[in-house]
Image: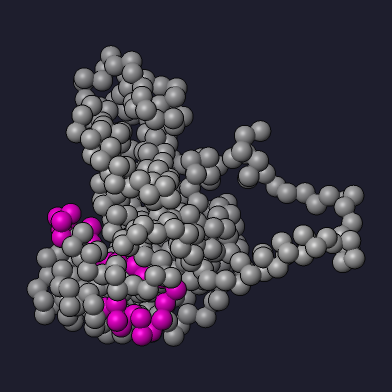
Amino acid sequence: MDSNSWASAPRKRCKNIVCHENLRSKKTDQVIVKLKQEIAGPHFQVLSQLKNSPVRRGRLRTPHGCIETPAFMTVGTAGTVKAMDPVDLKNLGAEIILCNAYHMFLRPGHEFVKKRGGLHSFIGWDRPILTDSGGYQIFSLKGFCKITEEGVAFQSHIDGARHFISPEKAIEIEAALGADIIMAFDECLEYPAERKRAQASLERTLRWAARSKSAHHRKDQMLYGIIQGGAYPDLRKQGVDGLLELGFDGFAVGGLSVGEPQEEMLKVLEEVVPLIPRDKPRYLMGVGTPSDLVEAVSRGIDMFDCVMPTRHARTGILYTAQGQVHIKHARYKEDDLPLDPSCACYTCSNFSRAYLRHLFVAKELLAMRLNTLHNLYYYLSLMSRLRKAIAENTLDAFRHDFYHNRSLGI
C-alpha cells in the first residue's frame, strides 16, 4: 500500500490496547500537552521566512487538517473538480479545495447540503475546504444584477429565477455549507475603474465586511476579509486599515486577475502585503498563471486559487517546464515523447504526446481526465518546489531555473 493510500485508509481502534491514566509515560504526557498547545494555538504559523523579505513558508490549521503554504487551492466550483474524484486529488497532493457558495446556493441549495452533513460529507472530501462568497460570479452577470446598499439582486444563470444576496445571506449560505474558511461578501470592481468608482466600491465593501463579520458566529470557520481599492495605493491602504479594525482571520487581495497586466498586479501586492499582519494568511484570489504564482510567492502571498489548470486541460492547453503545449496541434500527431519528460505524473509516466493528441482530437473523455491530472500535478508540484526553495533559502536560484527552462521552449 502506498503512502497516499495509507493516509486515506480508515483508522480502526485496537481492542487489545487498554489506556489508563496510571500507565501513561512521562513522554506521553509531554506529547499530549504539546498537542493541546498546538490545537489551542494560532490558526496560522510562519515556519520560515527569508531575511529582509515578505516571503515565507507557513502552516494553516483547520478542523479538517493542515495546509502547508504557499498553497494552491484546486477549484471545485460546484462541489467537484471537473474530471477528478477525491482520491485523485489526494494522490496529487491537494490539501484544500475551493467551492463556490453562489453555485452551491443555486444548485443543489445550501440547506440541501446542510441536511446532508455539509460540503465535506456531501462531496466526500475530508480535507479543508474554502468557499468563496460568490460576489465575483454575481457581479459578472452584469446586466442581470442590481446593486444596492442592502445587497445584490440578480437572475440565476441556470433558470432565470430571481434571487437576492446580502452580506448576511452570504454568511448564512457559507455557514450552512460548512467550509473551514469562508469569505466576506464584497463588491467586485470592474477593470479599469475610475477613482471615484473605486472609492465608492471600497467603502461599500468595508460596510459589507462589517455586516459579514457581525453575521459570522461559527467558531469552527475562519472568516477572511477581502481587500479592494482597484489600482489606487491609498485606497488599497484604506481597505487594509478598515479590515484590520474589524478583525479577520485572514486577508484576501481581491479585484485582481480581471484584465490588468501582470506588472500592475505585482505593484498592488508590493503595496498591500507589507500592511497585512505577519500572523495572518495572505490570499490572492483568482490567480493565476505559473509565472503569476512564482512572482506572487516572491512578494509574500500564501494562498492562491484559479480555474486555469483545469479549464485549460479541457481545452487541450497543458503546462510543462518549458511552457505550454497545445496538444491539438499537428506537430504532436506522431510525437512519441512524454508530454513533459521531467514530469513524474501518471499522464507523463504512461502516455505519449501522440496518444494525448489522439484522445483530444477524438473528443474522448479520457483526454479530459489525463490532461487534468497532469495540469493539477504541475501546479501542485510547483507549489511544493516553491515551499522547498523557501525552506532552503534557494528561491532566487529557483526563479532563475524556472524562467531559463521556459525560455528553451518545447
Q: Is residue 174 above or below residue 328?
A: below
What residue is shown at x 63% (from left), y 44% (from top)? 7
Asked where in the image residue 137 lies, by quadrant, the reply is bottom left
In this view, the residue in front, 19 or 88, is 19
In this view, the residue in front, 322 or 228, is 322
Instruction: Find out whether residue 243 is within the magenta segment.
Output: yes
Q: Is residue 110 visible?
A: no
Asked where in the image residue 351 lies, by quadrant, the reply is top left
Asked where in the image residue 117 lies, by quadrant, the reply is bottom right
Query: Looking at the picture, how far across and down is residue 217, in whole percent?
Result: 52, 80
Query: Looking at the picture, how far across and down is residue 65, in whole percent?
Result: 57, 58
Residue projecting furthest to the front: 51
Instruction: Find out whether residue 57 is within the magenta segment.
Output: no
Q: Is residue 175 above or below residue 358?
A: below
Query: Looking at the picture, how far across and down is residue 360, in whole percent?
Result: 32, 28
What residue is shown at x 34% (from left), y 67% (from top)? 252
Q: Which residues are magenta?
A: 239-264
Quadrant location of the C terminus in the rendered image: top left
What residue is shown at x 30% (from left), y 34% (from top)? 321
Residue projecting furthest to the left: 194
